[in-house]
Image: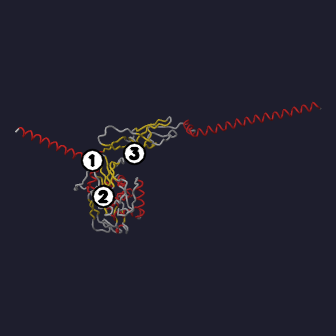
Amino acid sequence: MRKFIVYFMLISFIFSTLTIEVDAKEVDSKSIIPIVSADSAVLIDATTGEILYSKNKDVAYPPASTTKTMTALLTIERFKLSDVVTVGSNPPLADGSKIYIDKGEKLTVKELLYGMLLPSANDCAEALAEHISGSMPAFVKLMNARAKQLGCKNTNFVNPTGLYNKNHKTSSYDLSLIMRQLVKHSEYRIIATTSAYIIPPTNTSALARPLWNENKLIQKSSNYYYTGCEGGKTGYTIQSEHSYVAAVTRNGQRLIVALVHDKNGASFQEATNLFNYGFTNFELTKLYSKGDAVTTYKFDNLDIPLLATQDFYYVQKKGTKGLPILKFIFKQKNLSSTSFKTVDYLLQANVTIKGKSIGTINLSSGEYHELKPLTIVNEIFNKGTLRIFYSIISILAIAIVILRVRKKIRNKRRNRYINRYRNRKRMFKKRK
């Protein structure tokens, strides 16, 4: 009986240990780098731009309807949601998904954005493009110009919808940069997190148009619902395969996932895995608040404290103890020749940690600096100019000395000539 009790307790202990180990693995599963099937993928921190995960992030593929994030960005940047759009003759002919708008139909920018972002209607995208630029080619130029402004280096848009074209490409990293800018707009966040929307009857349609959001991360009825999701955009064509981009904010930290060219169609699950990985392993730390003293500017006899002009953040792995040692690198700039007031912007510094750049910070003056008259003179004759000035003075001095010597020689010759003449004149008088 005693042996049985001992065996029973031993087996119970082993099973309880195994259970604890399994639970630990479940807790730590979010710390493991996820496996992603998309050919190009990236996870970034939206505040700092720090890349937390990447896979072929700069390789460009056809992005399908995630293209519409750029169309939405240009629309929101240029028009009010209440502005009215009169549909032209081309948008109703758009291929692919549509909500069947008519030529001459009047819809607001807001209604067209809902139609474009929720069910991914191509006719709405083309109507917005024509409203903004007047034609598709003109709008495409605008798309590519804006992409370059955002830092996209592997993007070439051919249309505002994402319909397949071999020359229409972007990378996951470029797509994340577009979403990073788009999600800053509250208008987008409101529209993109709406589960369903109804476009009321218009001047050409007696029927209302019900719309359903295809982004499952914002659908509370979906198994993929993700708390804090601020919007996203799906994309699919047979040639382009699946693409997806989304933004999530939790505890003040916003992350962005972009997946391009995924043949498995597992975008929602893989995005969820990447978001879990990001929030589990990384945290956003504020290094400086606006107005905080950052470093000191030293040049010649000038010693000026420099202040942060905006909040500055750093992404670090969770569990890291203490703040990192920062190094500030800025182009040497002589400020001693300039008068400036407290809080006036002075220069920009690149912030590095162990040789790795973590961003740039704009710096302002922490003191008032007045340029004194003596300083003005000193600056006029700075080191370079002073050498030239001394050279000119030296040449002039030598020239003056030479001229004086030559003058003395001339005077001596002249005096000799005069003396000889006088002597001859005296001798001539004596002979007479």
Q: What kind of element bears circle 1? A: loop
Residue 52 lies, with reference to residue 406, above or below; the image says: below
Residue 274 in percent (x, y) is at 29, 50
Q: Which residue of the protein is positioned furthest toward the front in this rendering?
A: 3
Q: Amino acid at mark 2?
A: Asp
How far apart are the two marked residues, 1 and 2, measured between alpha carbons?
Answer: 21 Å
Residue 428 in percent (x, y) is at 92, 33
- Residue under circle 2? 262
Residue 249 lies, with reference to residue 62, above or below; the image says: above
Q: Is residue 254 left or right of residue 432?
A: left
Q: Quadrant of the C terminus?
A: top right
- Residue under circle 1? 32
How far apart are the two marked residues, 3 and 2, measured between alpha carbons?
Answer: 31 Å
Residue 351 lies, with reference to residue 152, above or below; the image says: above
Frontmost of labels 1 and 3 is 1
Q: Amino acid at mark 1?
A: Ile
Frontmost of labels 3 and 2 is 2
- Residue under circle 3? 359
Q: Is there any visible trace of residue 75 in the rendered image?
A: no
Q: Amino acid at mark 3?
A: Gly
Q: Earlier in the sequence, mark 3 or mark 2?
A: 2
